[in-house]
C-alpha cells in the first residue's frame, strides 16, 4: 500500500498543471513580503518585507540587508520623541520601494513613525540617509513614481506618492516630494502645498485603493478604485492624470474605466495593472475591432486585471481588460474641452463633475469658459479636480475571464506576439496568448499563497520574478527545451516556442541559428511540422526486380541546399538524398540483392497478416549532425496478399485492389500489373470493367455489380421467392463478360416467417438472423422490415375447452 500515495501525487501533478521546478532560483523571507523591485541597470532585486529590506543579485542570492523594525511606536503620536505617549514594539511594513538610478539610491517607505521614508544606497542598502512620512497603516495601498520637474528654472528630482486614507493619516491623496534639497527646502519635503482639493474633509469616505503609478510622455498617471459618492457601497475603477509640469495639480482629471463580459457581468474593482507595448499582432487585432480607437504597435496599452466588488458581488470572478493610452488621453481631452465650453456637457449630457465634493446626490461642475487647447494643463481657474461622469468613462470587453481571484499581471511581446502572465490568490501563474482571442496555453503553481502585484521581467525578458507571501521565485518565461519532438513542440501552442529544424530541438526563435531562413524555425502555433506529404511513384511492389528512385514532397519545405548533406534511411537502407529543383527530395529504395546460385533476396519486411502491403519507414536526416528532418512511411504492396483480402473471392479481391494487380484464371495467381501481357487467361485490374453475379435460385437473371467511390463493389439486391424452408444456402458466381471468375461466394438465405407462427416461436429463433415479433401485422419478420416490435410476448389465452373422455352425469 505504500506506493499508492506516491502514485496519487504523480497523477495530481500531471493533471493539474506544472509545478515550479526546484532548479529555479528562490529567495525566502522570514516575514511577509510587501514590495519587490529591480534595478534594470544592474539586475539587482530589492525586497521590501516586514521589518527588513533585502538586496539580492539577479539570481536571488542575498548581497545585503537592513532591519527596519520592529521598533517602539504609537501611531497617534508624533515621532521621534513621543512625549507623553505610551509606545509598544511595532512591526514596520514596507509601503513603497522605488529605484532612483539618477543618484544611486533606493527610496524606501515604511509604516512606522507616521510612515517613515529613507534613502538607501543601491550598492549597499544598509546605508541609511534620510527620512519622511507617507502612511502609518499596514494594509493601506501606496504607489509612487519618480520624475523631474522645473523648480526656479532648474531640474529637480521628485517623486509623486498616491495613497489611500488611514485614520491617522493626512487626507492628501497625491503629493509631490523632493528627492534633493532645493532652495532651502529639505529633502522629502512637499514640493507644493497649493492643492486645496487634497485636504477635502470627505476624502476618507471614498475609500481609495491605489494599484499603479506610471509615467508616459508628458503625463503622470494613477490607477485606483474608489466609491462614486458618499453614500454608495460599490467600488469603481478610475485612472487619473496630471501634467508633469503641473506642480499645482490644476490639470488633475479622473476617468472611469469599465470592464464587463458581453455587457452583463461587471468587473469593477482593479486588482493590478501593467503598461506595455501591445506587439504587432495584438495592435492589429485591437485596431481592426474598432473598440480601442486607432492602435499601432508603438501605442502603449494599459492591461488591467479586475475583480468583482465584494461589497456588491460575492463571487470571486476576475477578468483582464485592455485600454489604449491614446484613447484614454483622447477621452480626457474631450472631458476637458467639455469643461472649457462652460457647460461641461457632451451631446447635451453632463460629462464632467467635481469629485470629492458631492452633496445631496448632485455632481457639481467646476468649469469655466475657456478656449479649448489654450490650457491643456489647466490653471488656477481650476482649483478643484475634474472627473468624467460614468456615462463618459471608457468601457472595454473582457478578453479573458476566470471564476477565481486574479491578483497580478505582467505583459511581454515575443516575435510580435503578446503574452500575459496572470497571478492568482492561490499561487498560480497563468500564461495567456493575447491575439484576436485570448488563449491560456500553460499554467504553473509557485505556492499556495497570493501572487504579489509586483510581477516583473528581468532585463532580457528571459525570466519573470514571481512573489508570494514570503518567497520570490525566478521563473523562466518559457521551457521549450523540455519538448523533445516537433510534434510535442507545436502541440504546446506556446508563443515562445518553435521547432528549430536543422538543430532538431524546440527553442525560442532567437536561439535557432537558421531561424531567418524559410521554414527553419516552425512556430508552435503554426501546428505544422515538416512532413513527407507525397511520393512519386506513390508505391511499388515488394517483388519488383528493379526499383526507381523515389521522389518525396516535403511540407513545409525548409530552405536547404546540397551543402546540407541529407541522408535517406529507407527501411534500414541508407543512401545520399538528392535535393531536386521544385522543392522535392529523391532517395534510393532498398535494392533487390542477387546472390549467385540462390533466389533473389527481397530485403523488404514480410507483409503482415490481414494486409496486402508493408509500410517501410523513410527517414531524412542531416548527415553530419544526425538530426532528423522528416519521417514518413512508404508502402510496398504484395499482390499475392491482395487476393486474400476478400473472403471467398480471390479474383475479385485481386483485380479490385488499389495496387492494380492482375489475375491469371488458369494459374489462379494474383501478380503485379504487366502492361505488355496480352494473355487471354489474364484479367487486368478492374478499373473501367463491369461485373455481374448470379445464382441457381435466380435462374437466368444476373445483376450488375457497382463500383463504389471507396473502390469496393456492391449490388443493389434481389428479391428471392422461396417458401420451402426456413433457410437455403446459395452459391453465387461472379462473371466478367462470359467468364466466371469466382464460384465460391456462399450466402445463406433465411425466412423469419416460415414455421414461426406465434411470438414464442419467433423469439426462439437464432439471434443472428434478427427475427422479431411484430405487433402489426402480428407475425415474425426481419427486424428492419418490422414497423413496431413487441418486446414481450402476450400472455397465453384459453380460447376453447374440450373433453378428452366421458364424464359421469
Image (cartoon, grey):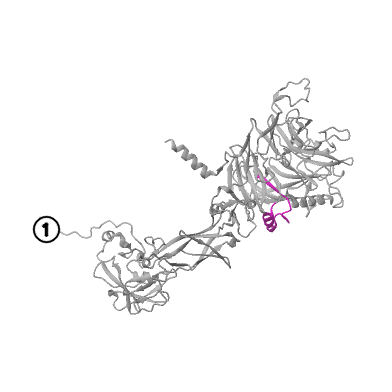
Percent x, y of residue 548 = 47, 68
Residue 301 part of the magenta-drawn span: yes
Percent x, y of residue 397 = 66, 51
Closer-to-camera residue (745/315): 745
Percent x, y of residue 238 = 73, 44
Horizontal relation, residue 567 to residue 216: left or right: left
Helix or strand or loop: what does disc 1 sit on? Answer: loop
The answer to whether residue 708 of the structure is visible from this angle is yes
**Quadrant position of residue 719:** bottom left
Q: Residue at x 30, y 59 (%)?
A: 767
Region in magenta: 278-306
| Quadrant where the image shows the C terminus | bottom left
Horizontal relation, residue 526 to residue 138: left or right: left
Residue situated furthest top in the rendering: 84
Q: Mark 1 — residue?
A: 805
Closer-to-camera residue (576/361): 576
Amino acid at each position: 500500500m505504500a506506493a499508492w500515495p506516491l502514485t496519487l501525487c504523480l497523477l495530481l501533478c500531471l493533471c493539474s498543471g506544472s509545478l515550479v521546478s526546484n532548479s529555479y532560483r528562490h529567495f525566502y523571507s522570514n516575514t511577509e513580503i510587501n514590495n519587490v523591485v529591480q534595478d534594470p541597470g544592474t539586475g539587482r532585486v530589492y525586497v521590501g518585507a516586514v521589518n527588513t529590506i533585502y538586496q539580492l543579485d539577479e539570481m536571488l542570492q542575498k548581497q545585503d540587508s537592513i532591519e527596519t523594525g520592529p521598533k517602539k511606536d504609537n501611531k497617534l503620536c508624533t515621532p521621534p520623541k513621543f512625549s507623553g505617549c505610551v509606545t509598544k514594539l511595532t512591526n514596520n511594513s514596507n509601503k513603497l520601494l522605488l529605484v532612483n538610478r539618477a543618484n544611486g539610491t533606493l527610496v524606501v517607505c515604511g509604516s512606522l513613525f507616521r510612515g517613515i521614508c529613507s534613502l538607501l544606497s543601491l550598492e549597499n542598502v544598509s546605508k541609511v540617509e534620510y527620512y519622511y512620512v507617507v502612511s502609518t497603516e499596514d494594509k493601506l495601498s501606496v504607489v509612487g513614481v519618480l520624475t523631474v520637474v522645473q523648480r526656479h528654472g532648474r531640474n529637480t528630482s521628485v517623486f509623486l506618492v498616491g495613497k489611500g486614507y488611514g485614520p491617522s493619516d493626512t487626507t492628501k491623496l497625491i503629493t509631490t516630494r523632493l528627492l534633493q534639497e532645493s532652495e532651502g527646502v529639505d529633502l522629502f519635503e512637499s514640493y507644493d502645498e497649493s492643492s486645496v482639493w487634497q485636504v477635502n474633509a470627505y476624502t476618507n469616505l471614498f475609500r481609495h485603493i491605489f494599484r499603479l503609478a506610471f509615467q508616459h510622455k508628458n503625463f503622470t498617471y494613477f490607477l485606483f478604485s474608489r466609491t462614486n459618492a458618499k453614500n454608495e457601497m460599490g467600488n469603481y475603477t478610475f485612472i487619473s492624470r496630471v501634467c508633469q509640469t503641473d506642480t499645482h495639480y490644476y490639470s488633475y482629471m479622473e476617468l472611469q474605466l469599465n470592464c464587463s463580459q458581453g455587457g452583463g457581468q461587471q468587473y469593477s474593482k482593479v486588482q493590478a495593472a501593467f503598461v506595455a507595448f501591445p506587439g504587432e499582432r495584438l495592435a492589429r487585432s485591437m485596431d481592426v475591432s474598432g473598440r480601442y480607437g486607432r492602435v499601432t504597435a508603438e501605442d502603449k496599452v494599459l492591461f488591467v486585471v479586475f475583480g468583482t466588488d465584494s461589497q456588491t458581488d460575492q463571487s470571486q470572478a476576475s477578468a483582464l481588460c485592455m485600454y489604449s493610452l491614446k484613447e484614454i488621453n483622447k477621452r480626457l481631452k474631450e472631458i476637458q474641452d467639455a469643461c472649457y465650453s462652460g457647460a461641461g456637457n457632451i451631446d447635451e449630457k453632463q460629462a464632467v463633475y467635481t469629485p470629492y465634493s458631492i452633496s445631496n446626490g448632485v455632481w457639481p461642475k467646476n468649469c469655466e469658459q475657456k478656449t479649448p487647447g489654450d490650457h491643456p494643463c489647466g490653471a488656477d481657474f481650476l482649483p478643484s479636480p475634474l472627473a468624467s461622469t460614468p456615462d463618459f468613462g471608457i468601457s472595454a470587453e473582457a478578453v479573458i475571464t476566470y471564476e477565481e481571484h486574479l491578483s497580478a499581471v505582467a505583459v511581454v511581446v515575443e516575435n510580435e506576439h503578446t503574452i500575459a502572465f496572470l497571478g492568482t490568490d492561490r499561487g498560480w501563474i497563468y500564461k495567456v496568448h493575447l491575439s484576436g482571442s485570448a488563449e491560456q496555453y500553460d499554467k504553473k503553481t509557485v505556492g499556495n499563497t497570493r501572487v504579489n502585484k509586483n510581477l516583473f521581467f528581468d532585463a532580457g525578458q528571459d525570466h519573470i520574478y514571481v512573489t508570494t507571501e514570503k518567497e520570490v521565485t525566478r521563473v523562466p518565461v518559457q521551457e521549450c527545451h523540455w519538448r523533445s519532438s516537433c510534434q510535442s513542440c507545436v502541440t504546446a501552442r506556446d508563443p515562445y516556442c518553435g521547432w528549430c529544424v536543422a538543430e532538431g530541438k524546440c527553442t525560442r526563435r532567437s536561439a535557432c541559428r537558421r531561424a531567418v531562413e524559410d521554414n527553419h524555425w516552425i512556430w508552435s502555433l503554426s501546428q505544422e511540422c515538416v512532413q513527407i506529404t507525397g511520393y512519386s511513384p506513390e508505391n511499388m511492389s515488394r517483388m519488383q526486380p528493379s526499383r526507381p528512385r523515389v521522389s518525396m514532397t516535403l511540407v513545409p519545405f525548409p530552405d536547404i541546399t546540397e551543402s546540407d548533406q541529407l541522408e535517406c534511411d529507407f527501411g534500414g537502407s541508407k543512401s545520399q538524398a538528392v535535393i531536386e529543383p521544385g522543392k522535392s527530395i529523391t532517395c534510393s529504395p532498398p535494392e533487390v540483392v542477387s546472390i549467385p546460385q540462390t533466389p533473389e533476396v527481397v530485403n523488404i519486411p514480410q507483409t503482415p497478416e490481414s494486409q496486402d502491403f508493408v509500410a517501410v519507414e523513410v527517414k531524412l536526416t542531416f548527415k553530419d549532425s544526425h538530426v532528423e528532418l522528416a519521417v514518413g512511411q512508404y508502402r510496398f504492396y504484395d499482390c499475392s496478399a491482395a487476393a486474400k483480402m476478400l473472403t471467398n473471392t480471390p479474383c475479385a479481391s485481386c483485380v479490385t485492389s488499389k495496387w492494380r494487380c492482375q489475375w491469371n484464371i488458369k494459374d489462379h495467381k494474383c501478380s503485379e500489373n504487366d502492361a505488355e501481357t496480352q494473355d487471354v487467361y489474364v484479367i487486368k485490374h478492374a478499373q473501367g470493367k463491369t461485373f455481374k453475379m448470379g445464382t441457381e435460385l435466380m435462374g437466368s437473371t444476373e445483376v450488375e455489380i457497382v463500383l463504389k467511390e471507396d473502390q469496393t463493389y456492391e449490388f443493389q439486391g434481389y428479391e428471392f421467392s422461396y417458401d420451402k424452408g426456413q433457410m437455403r444456402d446459395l452459391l453465387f458466381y461472379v462473371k466478367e463478360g462470359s467468364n466466371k471468375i469466382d464460384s465460391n461466394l456462399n450466402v445463406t438465405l433465411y425466412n423469419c416467417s416460415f414455421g414461426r407462427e406465434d411470438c414464442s416461436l419467433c423469439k426462439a429463433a437464432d439471434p443472428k438472423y434478427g427475427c422479431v415479433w411484430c405487433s402489426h401485422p402480428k407475425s415474425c419478420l426481419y427486424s428492419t422490415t418490422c414497423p413496431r416490435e413487441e418486446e414481450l410476448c402476450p400472455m397465453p389465452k384459453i380460447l376453447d375447452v374440450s373433453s378428452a373422455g366421458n364424464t359421469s352425469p
